[in-house]
Image: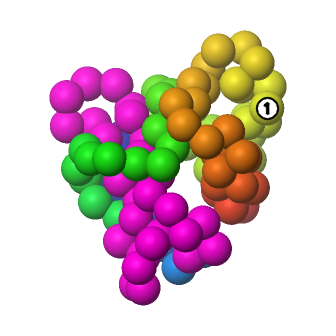
Amino acid sequence: MVDELFQALSGRAPQFRSLNARVKFVLGGPGDTILVDARNTPVTVERADGDADCAIRLTPENLKRLMNGKMDPVLAFTLGKLKVDGSKGLAMKLASLLED
């Protein structure tokens, strides 16, 4: 499922340009991290770990639900299904970009 999410995020890379930051999705096990770097053009999406302005920790299933608009990011954060390390404002901006 992580490969599928990586492909979906890669396809949306141009949408992330307005972030002007590095964001990583930590999806569980080792190697299950996706790093979005929107500081440069073109925006890059990699299956890698690294420094980021914001790290979002959630399960692959919940990321898929978030991207499909089937999960509210604020409710997910409140219920502990989504954890944010770093800029919460950046996480909210990203959540709005992820929704279909």
Screen quadrant of the N terminus = top left
Neighbourhood count class around disc 1 (C-alpha, 10 Å): few under 14, some 14–19, many 20 upward: few
| Vertical comparison of 90 with 58: above or below | below
Residue 39 lies within the magenta run: yes
- Give coordinates of residue 97: x percent, y percent: 68, 61
Residue 66 colored in magenta in the image: no
> Which element carries disc 1, helix, strand or loop?
helix
Asked whether, in this view, residue 33 is left or right of residue 65, the answer is left
Disc 1 marks a residue whose amino acid type is Val
Horizontal relation, residue 69 to residue 1: left or right = right
Q: Nearer the viewer, residue 89 or 57?
A: 89
Q: Residue furthest top?
A: 79
Query: Relative to residue 1, is residue 62 drawn left or right?
Result: right
Answer yes or no: is residue 98 visible.
yes
Magenta segment boundaries in residue numbering: 17-44
Q: Is residue 73 shown left or right of residue 94? A: right
Q: Residue at x 55, y 69 (%)?
A: 20
Query: Which color scheme does this rendered protein use?
Result: rainbow
> Which residue sits at x=35%, y=71%?
44
Residue 2 image point, x, y percent: 34, 43
User: What residue lies at 64% left-to-right and 15% top-to-bottom?
Assistant: 80
Residue at 26% across, 24% down = 29
